[in-house]
Amino acid sequence: MRRVVAVPADLSREQFGLSPSAFASLAGDIRAAYHCAAEVNFIAPYEKLAASNVGGVREMIRLATAGGAILHYVSSVAVFPYGTSRIVREDDDVAGVTTLTGGYAQSKWTSERMVWKAISRGLRAVIYRPAQIVGRHVGGQPHDLFHHILRACEILRAVPDIDARIDMVTSEYAASAIRCLSAQESSPGKAFHLVHPEPVSLRDFVELFPTPLPLVPLEIWLGRMRREAECSDDPSLHFISMLAQGLERTDLTPPAFDCSNTIASLHGTGVICPPLDRQFIQREPALSETTRAAVGSL
Protein backbone atom coordinates (compact mmCIF):
# COMPACT_ATOMS: atom_id res chain seq x y z
CA MET A 1 0.00 0.00 0.00
CA ARG A 2 1.30 3.46 -0.86
CA ARG A 3 1.76 5.66 2.20
CA VAL A 4 2.02 8.98 0.35
CA VAL A 5 -0.58 10.13 -2.14
CA ALA A 6 -0.12 13.50 -3.84
CA VAL A 7 -3.29 15.53 -4.32
CA PRO A 8 -2.87 18.51 -6.69
CA ALA A 9 -4.47 21.54 -5.06
CA ASP A 10 -4.55 25.33 -5.15
CA LEU A 11 -4.27 27.20 -1.85
CA SER A 12 -5.97 30.26 -3.27
CA ARG A 13 -9.18 28.48 -4.29
CA GLU A 14 -12.18 27.34 -2.27
CA GLN A 15 -11.75 23.74 -1.11
CA PHE A 16 -8.28 23.93 -2.68
CA GLY A 17 -9.89 23.68 -6.11
CA LEU A 18 -11.10 20.14 -5.41
CA SER A 19 -14.57 18.95 -6.21
CA PRO A 20 -16.97 18.82 -3.23
CA SER A 21 -16.85 15.04 -3.24
CA ALA A 22 -13.03 14.94 -3.41
CA PHE A 23 -12.78 17.47 -0.57
CA ALA A 24 -15.22 15.46 1.56
CA SER A 25 -13.36 12.23 0.81
CA LEU A 26 -10.05 13.80 1.79
CA ALA A 27 -11.55 15.14 5.02
CA GLY A 28 -12.83 11.69 5.89
CA ASP A 29 -9.41 10.10 5.43
CA ILE A 30 -7.30 12.32 7.69
CA ARG A 31 -6.73 12.37 11.43
CA ALA A 32 -4.14 15.16 11.46
CA ALA A 33 -3.49 18.01 9.05
CA TYR A 34 -0.08 19.68 8.87
CA HIS A 35 -0.15 23.02 7.12
CA CYS A 36 3.13 24.76 6.32
CA ALA A 37 2.45 25.95 2.78
CA ALA A 38 2.63 29.67 2.09
CA GLU A 39 3.71 32.17 -0.50
CA VAL A 40 6.85 33.64 1.05
CA ASN A 41 7.45 37.07 -0.41
CA PHE A 42 8.82 39.92 1.71
CA ILE A 43 8.14 42.58 -0.93
CA ALA A 44 4.62 41.76 -2.06
CA PRO A 45 1.70 43.54 -0.34
CA TYR A 46 -0.89 41.80 1.79
CA GLU A 47 -3.46 41.97 -1.00
CA LYS A 48 -1.29 39.79 -3.24
CA LEU A 49 -0.52 37.20 -0.57
CA ALA A 50 -3.89 36.93 1.14
CA ALA A 51 -5.47 34.54 -1.37
CA SER A 52 -2.86 31.81 -0.81
CA ASN A 53 -1.67 32.51 2.73
CA VAL A 54 -4.96 33.44 4.38
CA GLY A 55 -7.33 31.62 2.06
CA GLY A 56 -5.27 28.44 2.28
CA VAL A 57 -5.46 28.43 6.08
CA ARG A 58 -9.20 29.06 5.96
CA GLU A 59 -9.69 26.02 3.74
CA MET A 60 -7.38 23.93 5.92
CA ILE A 61 -9.49 24.84 8.97
CA ARG A 62 -12.57 23.72 7.04
CA LEU A 63 -10.86 20.47 6.06
CA ALA A 64 -9.77 19.67 9.62
CA THR A 65 -13.18 20.63 11.02
CA ALA A 66 -15.03 18.47 8.50
CA GLY A 67 -12.89 15.45 9.28
CA GLY A 68 -12.52 15.97 13.02
CA ALA A 69 -8.75 16.14 12.55
CA ILE A 70 -6.16 18.00 14.59
CA LEU A 71 -4.71 20.95 12.69
CA HIS A 72 -0.98 21.55 13.03
CA TYR A 73 -0.39 25.03 11.66
CA VAL A 74 3.10 26.38 11.00
CA SER A 75 2.87 30.11 11.58
CA SER A 76 5.92 32.37 12.04
CA VAL A 77 7.63 34.53 14.63
CA ALA A 78 6.91 37.32 12.11
CA VAL A 79 3.44 37.66 13.65
CA PHE A 80 5.11 39.80 16.33
CA PRO A 81 6.58 43.20 15.39
CA TYR A 82 10.22 44.19 15.28
CA GLY A 83 11.55 47.21 17.12
CA THR A 84 10.73 46.06 20.64
CA SER A 85 13.04 44.92 23.42
CA ARG A 86 10.42 42.86 25.22
CA ILE A 87 10.45 39.08 25.44
CA VAL A 88 7.68 37.42 23.44
CA ARG A 89 6.36 34.34 25.18
CA GLU A 90 4.62 31.39 23.58
CA ASP A 91 1.29 32.12 25.25
CA ASP A 92 1.27 35.81 24.30
CA ASP A 93 -1.93 36.75 22.50
CA VAL A 94 -1.31 37.83 18.90
CA ALA A 95 -4.56 39.80 19.09
CA GLY A 96 -2.58 42.41 21.03
CA VAL A 97 -0.40 43.15 18.01
CA THR A 98 -1.50 46.46 16.49
CA THR A 99 1.09 47.15 13.78
CA LEU A 100 3.08 44.88 11.46
CA THR A 101 5.31 45.86 8.57
CA GLY A 102 5.08 43.91 5.32
CA GLY A 103 2.41 41.88 3.58
CA TYR A 104 3.93 38.51 4.50
CA ALA A 105 3.91 39.19 8.25
CA GLN A 106 0.40 40.61 7.99
CA SER A 107 -0.86 37.54 6.13
CA LYS A 108 0.67 35.18 8.70
CA TRP A 109 -0.83 37.22 11.55
CA THR A 110 -4.29 37.13 9.98
CA SER A 111 -3.98 33.39 9.39
CA GLU A 112 -2.93 32.68 12.96
CA ARG A 113 -5.81 34.77 14.30
CA MET A 114 -8.17 32.62 12.23
CA VAL A 115 -6.75 29.46 13.79
CA TRP A 116 -7.09 30.84 17.33
CA LYS A 117 -10.71 31.80 16.64
CA ALA A 118 -11.34 28.27 15.33
CA ILE A 119 -9.76 26.86 18.49
CA SER A 120 -12.14 28.95 20.60
CA ARG A 121 -15.01 27.31 18.68
CA GLY A 122 -13.80 23.78 19.32
CA LEU A 123 -11.14 23.00 16.72
CA ARG A 124 -8.20 21.03 18.07
CA ALA A 125 -5.11 22.76 16.73
CA VAL A 126 -1.46 23.39 17.53
CA ILE A 127 0.49 26.44 16.36
CA TYR A 128 4.22 26.42 15.66
CA ARG A 129 6.14 29.67 15.20
CA PRO A 130 9.54 29.01 13.63
CA ALA A 131 12.37 31.50 13.31
CA GLN A 132 14.81 31.36 10.39
CA ILE A 133 15.09 27.74 9.22
CA VAL A 134 18.35 26.72 7.59
CA GLY A 135 17.82 23.92 5.10
CA ARG A 136 20.19 21.62 3.26
CA HIS A 137 19.61 22.94 -0.25
CA VAL A 138 22.97 23.37 -1.98
CA GLY A 139 23.70 24.89 -5.36
CA GLY A 140 21.78 27.32 -7.49
CA GLN A 141 20.65 30.81 -6.60
CA PRO A 142 19.36 30.84 -3.01
CA HIS A 143 15.95 32.41 -2.43
CA ASP A 144 16.16 32.53 1.35
CA LEU A 145 16.20 36.00 2.93
CA PHE A 146 19.19 35.25 5.14
CA HIS A 147 21.21 33.98 2.21
CA HIS A 148 20.36 37.10 0.21
CA ILE A 149 21.69 39.17 3.12
CA LEU A 150 24.88 37.12 3.33
CA ARG A 151 25.34 37.47 -0.41
CA ALA A 152 24.98 41.25 -0.13
CA CYS A 153 27.56 41.29 2.69
CA GLU A 154 29.88 39.21 0.52
CA ILE A 155 29.71 41.72 -2.34
CA LEU A 156 30.08 44.74 -0.06
CA ARG A 157 32.79 43.02 2.02
CA ALA A 158 31.13 44.35 5.18
CA VAL A 159 28.33 43.60 7.65
CA PRO A 160 25.93 46.25 8.99
CA ASP A 161 26.53 47.02 12.66
CA ILE A 162 23.02 46.65 14.09
CA ASP A 163 21.58 45.28 17.32
CA ALA A 164 20.25 42.14 15.69
CA ARG A 165 20.27 38.59 16.98
CA ILE A 166 20.91 35.61 14.75
CA ASP A 167 18.11 33.22 15.61
CA MET A 168 18.06 30.22 13.32
CA VAL A 169 17.33 26.53 13.60
CA THR A 170 18.04 23.61 11.30
CA SER A 171 15.32 22.06 9.19
CA GLU A 172 16.03 18.75 10.95
CA TYR A 173 15.37 20.31 14.35
CA ALA A 174 12.20 22.07 13.22
CA ALA A 175 10.79 18.92 11.60
CA SER A 176 11.71 16.68 14.54
CA ALA A 177 10.28 19.15 17.04
CA ILE A 178 6.97 19.38 15.17
CA ARG A 179 6.81 15.58 14.92
CA CYS A 180 7.35 15.12 18.66
CA LEU A 181 5.14 17.99 19.79
CA SER A 182 2.31 16.97 17.49
CA ALA A 183 2.25 13.50 19.03
CA GLN A 184 1.71 14.83 22.56
CA GLU A 185 -1.87 14.85 23.82
CA SER A 186 -1.27 18.07 25.75
CA SER A 187 -0.27 20.10 22.66
CA PRO A 188 -3.66 21.13 21.18
CA GLY A 189 -4.57 24.67 22.11
CA LYS A 190 -0.94 25.72 22.54
CA ALA A 191 1.66 27.65 20.56
CA PHE A 192 5.32 26.60 20.38
CA HIS A 193 8.26 28.77 19.40
CA LEU A 194 10.70 26.88 17.18
CA VAL A 195 13.50 29.33 17.86
CA HIS A 196 17.05 28.94 19.08
CA PRO A 197 17.22 28.82 22.90
CA GLU A 198 20.56 30.66 22.79
CA PRO A 199 20.62 33.07 19.84
CA VAL A 200 23.80 35.03 19.21
CA SER A 201 24.31 38.66 18.33
CA LEU A 202 25.21 39.56 14.77
CA ARG A 203 28.58 40.79 16.03
CA ASP A 204 29.33 37.41 17.61
CA PHE A 205 27.99 35.51 14.60
CA VAL A 206 30.37 37.15 12.12
CA GLU A 207 33.22 36.20 14.45
CA LEU A 208 32.42 32.56 13.68
CA PHE A 209 33.47 33.05 10.07
CA PRO A 210 36.99 31.88 9.16
CA THR A 211 37.82 35.45 8.16
CA PRO A 212 35.28 37.77 9.82
CA LEU A 213 33.92 40.58 7.70
CA PRO A 214 34.23 44.06 9.25
CA LEU A 215 31.24 45.73 10.87
CA VAL A 216 30.32 49.15 9.52
CA PRO A 217 27.57 51.61 10.57
CA LEU A 218 24.18 50.74 9.08
CA GLU A 219 23.88 54.02 7.18
CA ILE A 220 27.26 53.49 5.49
CA TRP A 221 26.38 49.88 4.62
CA LEU A 222 23.04 50.90 3.12
CA GLY A 223 24.73 53.65 1.08
CA ARG A 224 27.27 51.20 -0.31
CA MET A 225 24.50 48.74 -1.14
CA ARG A 226 22.42 51.30 -3.04
CA ARG A 227 25.41 52.47 -5.05
CA GLU A 228 26.48 48.92 -5.84
CA ALA A 229 22.92 47.90 -6.79
CA GLU A 230 22.74 50.71 -9.35
CA CYS A 231 25.59 49.22 -11.38
CA SER A 232 25.12 45.51 -10.63
CA ASP A 233 22.70 42.90 -11.88
CA ASP A 234 23.10 40.72 -8.77
CA PRO A 235 19.59 39.69 -7.64
CA SER A 236 20.51 39.68 -3.95
CA LEU A 237 21.62 43.31 -4.03
CA HIS A 238 18.47 44.40 -5.83
CA PHE A 239 16.26 42.38 -3.47
CA ILE A 240 17.86 43.75 -0.28
CA SER A 241 17.87 47.26 -1.74
CA MET A 242 14.11 47.10 -2.40
CA LEU A 243 13.47 45.51 0.99
CA ALA A 244 15.40 48.24 2.81
CA GLN A 245 13.43 51.12 1.31
CA GLY A 246 11.76 53.11 4.05
CA LEU A 247 13.02 50.87 6.85
CA GLU A 248 14.12 52.38 10.13
CA ARG A 249 16.82 50.95 12.37
CA THR A 250 14.15 49.66 14.76
CA ASP A 251 12.59 47.66 11.91
CA LEU A 252 15.76 45.53 11.87
CA THR A 253 15.72 44.72 15.58
CA PRO A 254 13.63 41.64 16.38
CA PRO A 255 12.22 40.95 19.85
CA ALA A 256 13.52 38.09 21.95
CA PHE A 257 11.44 34.93 21.74
CA ASP A 258 11.03 32.67 24.75
CA CYS A 259 10.75 28.94 24.01
CA SER A 260 10.44 27.51 27.52
CA ASN A 261 7.31 25.48 26.72
CA THR A 262 8.94 23.98 23.63
CA ILE A 263 12.12 22.99 25.48
CA ALA A 264 10.14 21.53 28.38
CA SER A 265 7.87 19.54 26.05
CA LEU A 266 10.85 18.19 24.11
CA HIS A 267 12.74 17.18 27.24
CA GLY A 268 13.61 13.50 27.11
CA THR A 269 12.70 13.10 23.44
CA GLY A 270 16.26 13.43 22.18
CA VAL A 271 15.32 16.43 20.03
CA ILE A 272 17.88 19.12 20.80
CA CYS A 273 18.57 22.37 18.99
CA PRO A 274 22.27 22.43 17.96
CA PRO A 275 24.29 25.40 19.25
CA LEU A 276 25.09 28.33 16.97
CA ASP A 277 28.82 27.84 16.73
CA ARG A 278 31.47 27.30 14.08
CA GLN A 279 30.47 23.65 13.80
CA PHE A 280 26.88 24.72 13.10
CA ILE A 281 28.04 26.62 10.02
CA GLN A 282 30.20 23.74 8.86
CA ARG A 283 27.42 21.17 9.35
CA GLU A 284 24.86 23.07 7.25
CA PRO A 285 25.81 22.70 3.57
CA ALA A 286 23.73 25.63 2.32
CA LEU A 287 24.98 28.00 5.03
CA SER A 288 28.52 26.68 4.75
CA GLU A 289 28.50 27.21 0.98
CA THR A 290 27.38 30.81 1.42
CA THR A 291 29.96 31.63 4.07
CA ARG A 292 32.68 30.01 1.98
CA ALA A 293 31.79 32.32 -0.88
CA ALA A 294 31.65 35.30 1.45
CA VAL A 295 34.75 34.86 3.56
CA GLY A 296 36.94 32.25 1.95
CA SER A 297 37.45 28.53 2.33
CA LEU A 298 36.31 26.75 5.46
Image (cartoon, rainbow, N blue to C red):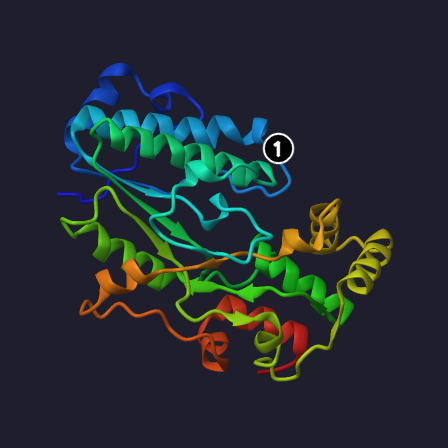
Instruction: Give the percent coordinates (x, y) of residue 261.
Output: 28, 58
**Mark 1 highlights which residue?**
45
How packed is label 1: few (under 14 Cα within 10 Å), some, or many (20 or more)? some
Q: In which quarter of the image is the C terminus?
A: bottom right
Residue 118 in sight in this render: yes
Instruction: Please report the residue visible at 61 percent of the width from the left and 82 percent of the height from the top.
Output: 297
Instruction: Please report the residue visible at 23 percent of the width from the left and 43 percent of the height from the top.
Output: 4
Nearest the eye: 68 or 105: 105
Query: Which residue appears farthest toward the top when viewing the image?
Result: 20
Left or right for 179, reference 29: right
Instruction: Give the percent coordinates (x, y) of residue 275.
Output: 41, 75
Q: Quadrant of residue 266?
A: bottom left
Number of numbered markers: 1
**Residue 214 versus residue 11 in the image, above or below:** below
Which structural element holds mark 1? Answer: loop
Nearest the eye: 43 or 19: 43
Instruction: Please report the residue visible at 45 percent of the width from the left and 25 percent of the height from the top.
Output: 12
Left or right for 43, reference 91: right
Residue 8 in sight in this render: no
Instruction: Give the percent coordinates (x, y) of residue 226.
Output: 82, 54
Nearest the eye: 61 or 235: 61
Instruction: Give the percent coordinates (x, y) of residue 124.
Output: 20, 36
- Amino acid found under the numbered disc labelled 1: Pro
Instruction: Please report the residue visible at 35 percent of the width from the left and 69 percent of the height from the top.
Output: 273
Left or right for 157, reference 171: right
